[in-house]
Image (cartoon, grey):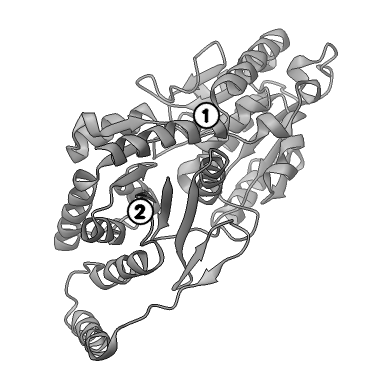
Amino acid sequence: MKIGYLMQKGEEIRRPPYNGPANHVRQVAQGLRELGHQVRVLVRLDETLWVTEDLAHFTPVELKRKGRAGRAAGLLESAARRVQTELRLPYLAYFESRYFALACQQELSECEVYLERMSWMTYGGLLAARRMKIPLALEYNGDPVIDLKAKGELPQGLQYRISRFIMTKALQSADRVIATGDGWRTNLIEDWQVRPERITTIENGTSLVELLDRSQLYSFQEDSGFNRPLTLVFLGGFYAWHGLPILLQALAIAREQQLDFRLHLIGSGAGEDETRSLAERLNLGGRVCFLGQLTDREFAPRLAEADIALSPYCGRPEYSGLKLFDYKAAGLPTIASGEHGQPSVLEHGITGLIVPPCDPAALAQAILQLAAAPALRREMGRRARLEAESQHRWSHTSKKIEQVLQEALAA
């Protein structure tokens, strides 16, 4: 197949370290190429459109507007934007989506199918797909309303109603929708009224199965260093909904129970300064190590030498976060916040523990439970790693996406 991979609201996919969305797109594109398909990626970054066929060389897109019609369209756009700004009219993202659609028509005209990582108020891929009669599959990696609410950026009033209407039409009009977890599939059906037969659940993957050999993992070693301080690890952003304040409060409780531990924080984000300040206020400064943003090759050995992994989301559900798969590939038992059987990628008591969100006491109790049971930690870690090897490689994800694209094309 000739596949056009779209990111109208792009993430930095040109150079590492890559965040979760960028890593997902790169891994899926590479996996589809390894399956024998041609993949051409179109991404919008820094107000510029870029196209690449190998994820190594990126070419800026110069849209070829045709003669007087192109100049007239440019003047109309400028006038409309000025009126919208001055009168504070609702934002429709029309010109951005129209521009992206024209770029798709210009750069991806030979593609047989489109695969798009969906973002809030982006429908350029849909416009192009309908004009060119090309099937479109949308990747749904989480409810954008929940995400914007967690960030405090959710629009209000008429703007919200218009935005939600646009997103509903985009989701319902796609030929296929790929949900990255069963929780998001349910969300699509119940909150966005997408037809169930159009939705396929395909979980994310991890590259750490290839980067880490079993022999490097504590859970597969006979002498796992259980006499040293307990090493906890968190991988992700420093945003409020990632739950780092809850985690630090839980560790303060655990310390009162005489737990000897070290916490390694891998990542960055807007809340890093607040996290550092809170660690000091809770007298945890000497026990918390801020390692910064690392590539997968850099953080893989850090995970391999840890005892327990943490995913303490608070204020935003996470049904299929990349960190959960990386933790499993590193042979780690994971303590994650969740409810109603989610996140389903973990089995409570088997590959980790699931605790109520935003509950420091429950999180502290789970940490203390695993801290006191080294044999259980080892068994959980081994089971997690074996599941990662058999189910969570990026090649598994790409193969399933290939099948969805083939079905969309056949239909």
Horizontal and vertical percent position of residue 87: 16, 81
| Pick the front one: 332 or 367 | 332
Q: Label 2 crowding class (10 Å Cα cut-off): few <14, some 14-19, many 20+?
A: some
Task: State how many labels appear.
Answer: 2
Q: Position of residue 394 (x, y in %)?
A: 56, 34
User: In the rendered image of this protein, does residue 391 appear above or below residue 409?
Assistant: above
Q: Is residue 262 visible?
A: no
The residue located at (66%, 17%) in the rendering is 381
Residue 138 point in image, percent of width and height: 33, 45
Tell me the kind of residue under disc 2: Ser
Residue 171 image position (x, y, % from top left): 24, 46
Q: Is residue 56 in sight in this rendering?
A: yes
> Tag 1, which secondary structure?
helix
Report the front residue among 138 and 85. Answer: 138
The amino acid marked with disc number 1 is His
**What residue sits right under mark 2 in the picture?**
119
Q: Earlier in the sequence, mark 2 or mark 1?
A: 2
Q: Which residue is mark 1?
A: 396
What residue is drawn where x is 45% and y is 43%? 241
Q: Quadrant of residue 183?
A: top left
- Alpha-carbon distance for marks 2 and 1? 24 Å
Question: In the picture provided, is 16 more to the left or to the right than 345?
Answer: right
Quadrant that contains the C terminus: top left
For the residues labelled 2 and 1, say whether their Cβ atoms are less than 8 Å apart: no
From the viewer's perspective, is residue 228 above or below residue 372? below
**Residue pictured at 74% horizontal, 30% vertical:** 212
Is label 2 in a helix, a strand or a loop? loop
Image quadrant occupied by the N terminus: top left
Q: Is residue 169 left or right of residue 385?
A: left
